[in-house]
Image (cartoon, helix red, strand yellow):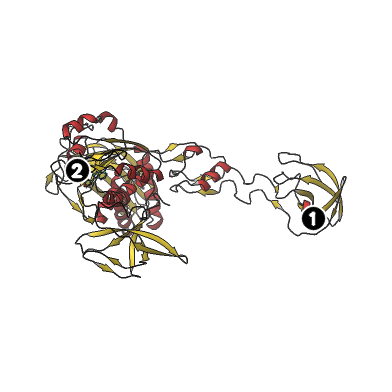
Amino acid sequence: MKIDIQLTAAPIPENLAPLSPPGAHGALLEFRGVIRAEEGGQPVPALEYEAYSEMASLEIRRLLESLAARHPCLSARVVHRVGVVPAGEPAVYVGVTSRHRAEAFALLDAFMNRVKQDVPIWKRRVLSPAASAPVNNVPPAPGPRAALFSLDEAMAEIRSRCQPLPAVRAPLAGAFGRVLRETVCALEDAPPFDRSARDGYAVLADDPSAAFQVVDTLHAADWKPRALQSGQAVRVATGTALPCGGLRVVMQEHVERHGDHIRLLKHDRATHIRLRGEDAKAGQPLEQAGVRLNAGTLALLAGVGCVQPLVSPRPSVAHFTTGGEIVPPHQTPGPGQIRDSNSTLIRGLLQNVPCDLEQNHLSEDFEKAWRQLDPGHLAQVDLILVSGGASVGDQDFTRPLLERLGFEIIFAQVNVRPGKPLLFGADGPRIAFGLPGNPLSHFVCFHFAVALALARLAGGETPPFSRAPLAGKLDGQSCPRETLWPSRLEWNDGAPRLRPLAWASSGDLTCLPAANALVRVPPNQALLPAGAEVDFLPAAAMICP
Ligand code: AMP
Ligand code: MG
């Protein structure tokens, strides 16, 4: 399929010629996505689109190519605006040609469904079409004050707003836990030559002799091509490059040696040779883009000489605690005070995610807290987390703080227990969460929201909800919200089982040590019997696959 992709700051032309020549196509389908002047009761004077053009073009191309395999079309032209686009103007144009109309309709529909999710182009509302650059400290028009999202809606919104950060090359020593952003192929055969798999003697493979003369000795690093004749043997070590083809290696343990002569004690049919390319052939794909680099993958990359793989960057994360009642854990709390456990929880949870974390406590006074911040520095931070103050109390200022930092608040509440007052903000590629202060809410929101955002920024995904039976009954109070119930995922004769943990309030800490999964309890469901199949979110692995 012929493809043309443009990301442009200029208006999209009225007439765009089809890419396939006249007469080739029987269907020409054109779509223009136009900015509406109003969204959810709020005026939208303009939208601003921001993109990493190279990456966005690459993703659009990849998407079109994968869709063309299912819906064979002749050509596709995509023009996407970047910068400020006033209401009434098209922001995106897609022109598709095909022999018959069905393929063009199917491809265009599938493309438009996937483009927002898969392609790193961000949009945000701007107050005036003239304001072209993002301006720090100028809060955008307030979004819906307390939009209540379902869990699925919240996760979908996070998934679509958090697009992969630009990839970087990193040395293997610093790549653990990052997401591979390129497919790695073997640069050479592995092993690169036929090698002995044993300490022993190389002889001709079909030599029927029972006794041999040792004509040479080769150590592991020796490279000495030579021919062998019947009755001759070469002393080799494990890993030695064999001197010629058509050999087998007799194990040292199977011979008796006297001076330069050996006699076979035992016949063994194995050749004891690791053949060139038997593990991997040059050019063979070894790892696909999207995998999380573990020790095994890194060893594989080291073995094939891929020493600077293209990987996700280490995102910078700034975490702030709030609340006048919070004191550091080493301090004895005075009356009305409690120790800060969230900083330790967040630091611990982020051990699983390569990132650069800074942590600070903010004053309970909004203006003082604002003066503690360095907006210039925070403009460079990929992810901002604020603990506490996300709700509606007199001193809950997380929302105005994030708005003053330039974030658009996408949602302010999620219909889930614990963790309802969760704020999610975006400013182009910058992401922010206001997490409800209670430790259990923190734990839950971290796993369904923050971990997902970090995984998406890295170019990966978190594990999806899985299904498993309950190991014991889940006996809670009926709640009109969905519940993410802290649970213990156990293995019983190879089968997963979920043990619901006891908790009384979202302020509880004692169930955290055992919690490694969150069971999804439907709304208004007080009791689930042992053995009931439930959906759960694993809470240990951070980024998959
Ligand atoms: P908030 O979200 O600010 O309304 O806080 C909800 C509850 O979480 C309050 O009881 C706070 O005292 C508590 N809390 C807030 N921050 C922390 C923290 N860093 N460590 C432990 N508890 C906290
Ligand atoms: Mg508070």
Residue bearing the label numbered 1: 254
Between residue 357 and residue 273, name the one nearer to us: 357
At which x and y percent is residue 400? 17, 38
Is disc 2 placed on a helix, strand or loop? loop
Between residue 386 and residue 158, name the one nearer to us: 386
Residue bearing the label numbered 2: 336
For mark 1, does the 10 Å Cα neighbourhood hold few (<14), some (14 to 19), or many (20 or more) residues? some
Q: Nearer the viewer, mark 1 or mark 2?
A: 2
The kind of residue on which mark 2 rests is Gly
Q: Horizontal placement of 170 versus 206: left or right?
A: left
Between residue 315 and residue 346, name the one nearer to us: 346
At which x and y percent is residue 329? 31, 40
The kind of residue on which mark 1 rests is His
Q: Are marks 1 and 2 in contact (CB under 8 Å)?
A: no
At which x and y percent is residue 231? 86, 51
At which x and y percent is residue 10? 25, 35
Looking at the rendered structure, the number of numbered marks drawn on it comes to: 2
Which quarter holds ligand 2? Answer: top left
